[in-house]
Amino acid sequence: MRSSLVRSSAFSLAVLVAGSALLSRSMAQQATLSAQEKKPPTNSSPGPNQAKPAKQAEPTLEEMLNKALKDNPDIRVAEAKVREADAELNRTRLQVTQKVLVFHHSRESQKAIIKVAEEDLQRIQKSQQSGLAGGRQAGSTTIERLESQAGGN
């Protein structure tokens, strides 16, 4: 088990090193080609009054990697997808927040309606215990209060 892990790690490292070597060779070739394209063709050797062209320093591995990572179209597409996923995440968070707020306000409204109904129920029970005859009118008052509460919230 351990030897297979070591072998797979060694293989992964070898692939990484080989890939880096190929990338650096490819980047060096591209840099050489682009330098040759930028240089105007000259058929004659520089004269005594003409200065010799300055030799450009070869880019370092870090510079080539940075340029490759910056200019690679696959990386640009992946970064765009990441930005799109972030935007979708923010939209979803906003939707969830809105749903929770709607639920919260609906729940508070229902609590207020229940409180009014319980107060009316207690009032009706007290009036029935004391023998007052207005029980039916008190029930209609409760319905009116509940409707006004529901309409107000």
Image (tube, grey):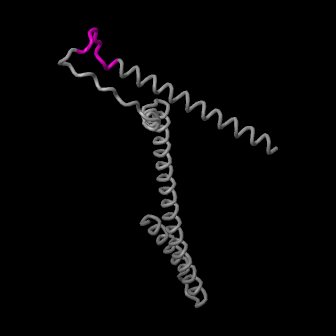
Toward which corner of the image does residue 148 lie, by quadrant? Answer: bottom left
The quarter of the rendered structure image containing the N terminus is top right
In this rendered view, identify the residue nearer to me: 3 or 118. Answer: 3
- Marks counted in the figure total 0
Residue sitting at the far right: 1
Q: Nearer the viewer, residue 64 or 106?
A: 64
| Side of 84 relative to 54 (left or right) | right
Q: Residue at x 57, y 83 (%)?
A: 122
Above/below status of 52 relative to 123: above
> Residue 43: within the magenta?
yes
Nearer the observer, 120 or 74: 74
Is residue 24 or residue 117 the one in the foreground? 24
Q: Residue at x 80, y 42 (%)?
A: 3
Is 19 on the left-hand or right-hand side of 149? right
Q: Which residues are magenta?
A: 37-46
Q: Position of residue 53 (x, y in %)?
A: 28, 22
- The overriding secondary structure of the stretch rendered in magenta is loop
